Amino acid sequence: MLVNAIPADRAFDILTWHSQETNVKVRNVAERLLTRVATDFHIPDAVRTHFDHVLLGR
């Protein structure tokens, strides 16, 4: 949702489509995606700080 600026239902549609194409449960597709994002993406400190402020409502 964040990367493509799409709503939750559209993101779920994409996960569902990928699940069907690969014959992997949606939960596992999502878990693999989050694992890859956590290990393969470098997020600059400024972005992390901004995200923290958004999360805290500042």
Image (cartoon, rainbow, N blue to C red):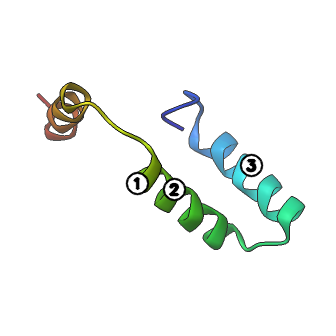
**Dot 3 or dot 2, earlier in sequence:** 3
Q: Where residue 36 is drawn, which disc sits there?
A: 2
x and y, in percent, of residue 43 in the image: 32, 36
> At 70% from the left edge and 54% from the top edge, which residue is drawn?
15
**What crowding class fits label 2: few (fewer than 14 Cα within 10 Å), some (14-19), or many (20 or more)?**
few
> At 43% from the left edge and 42% from the top edge, which residue is drawn?
41
Q: Secondary structure at mark 1?
A: helix
Q: Are marks 1 and 3 in contact (CB under 8 Å)?
A: no
Q: Where residue 38 is drawn, which disc sits there?
A: 1
In the picture, the quarter occupied by the C terminus is top left
Q: Are marks 2 and 1 in contact (CB under 8 Å)?
A: yes
Q: Label 1 vs label 3: CA separation?
A: 22 Å
Determine the image quadrant of residue 46.
top left
**Dot 1 or dot 3, earlier in sequence:** 3
x and y, in percent, of residue 34 in the image: 49, 57
Which residue is under mark 3?
13
The label nearer to you, 3 versus 2, is 2
Q: Secondary structure at mark 2?
A: helix
| Amino acid type at image mark 3 | Asp
